[in-house]
Image (cartoon, helix red, strand yellow):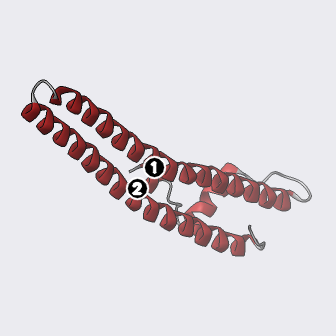
Amino acid sequence: MKLEQLAPPGATALLTELEAENPVSVGEGAVEEQRCAMIADLNQRIADVSFELSLAPAMYTALTRVCLASGTALTLLGFLDWAEAPVQGGVRAIVCALSGLVGAGVVSALGRRAKRTTQRTRESWDRSSRELGKSLGTSLS
């Protein structure tokens, strides 16, 4: 699942990654520059992850609606056949309605699972950023 790939590395691994991406330059204030660059990089990562996580609920809501709409549309087509062949049209309408409901139920269940994963990922990033903030000597928000 893509949401699980958004989980942060451990605080020490994240610190190592940030240090590798923001090497210390030579000169006065170089360490402070590196620290500020690392904080900016971490904030950018958190913003990117937050954006990705905010897309998941909307996507699952839209997919649930698509399932319900397609099931409803196909059910209506089944009812159109009802006049010519009542048994076949009725069976077709019921099967289409059930398939739409089952699809919506499955997508809804996946959406609830994604919501829990999203919450755990947000909490992990919060915890990692707090730990990293302590090691950088600042409070990250």
Q: Quadrant of residue 136?
A: bottom right
Depth order, front residue of 83/2: 83
Dot 1: what SS? helix
**Numbered label attached to residue 123:** none
Depth order, front residue of 80/57: 80
Residue indicated by mark 1: 61
Instruction: Determine whether label 2 and label 1 are within 8 Å by CB.
Output: yes
Dot 2: what SS? helix
Which residue extends farthest right? 28
Q: Nearer the viewer, mark 2 or mark 1?
A: 1
Q: Give left or right: position of 8 versus 141.
A: left
Quadrant for the C terminus, please: bottom right
**Residue that appears at 38% across and 61% down:** 113
- Amino acid type at image mark 1: Thr
- Image coordinates of residue 107 in percent, x first then y, are 34, 50
- Amino acid type at image mark 2: Gly
Marks 2 and 1, Cα distance to the nearest angstrom? 8 Å
Q: Give left or right: position of 18 versus 32.
A: left
- Image coordinates of residue 7 in percent, x first then y, are 50, 59
- Image coordinates of residue 132 in percent, x first then y, are 66, 69
Q: Give left or right: position of 125 versus 63.
A: right
The vertical placement of 96 against 101, above or below, is above
Residue indicated by mark 2: 111
Count residues near mark 2 (Cα–Cα under 10 Å), then give few for <14, some for 14-19, many for 20+. many
Total numbered badges shown on the rendered structure: 2
Depth order, front residue of 76/120: 76
**Residue that appears at 68% across and 57% down:** 42
Count residues near mark 1 (Cα–Cα under 10 Å), then give few for <14, some for 14-19, many for 20+. some
**Residue that appears at 36% across and 55% down:** 108
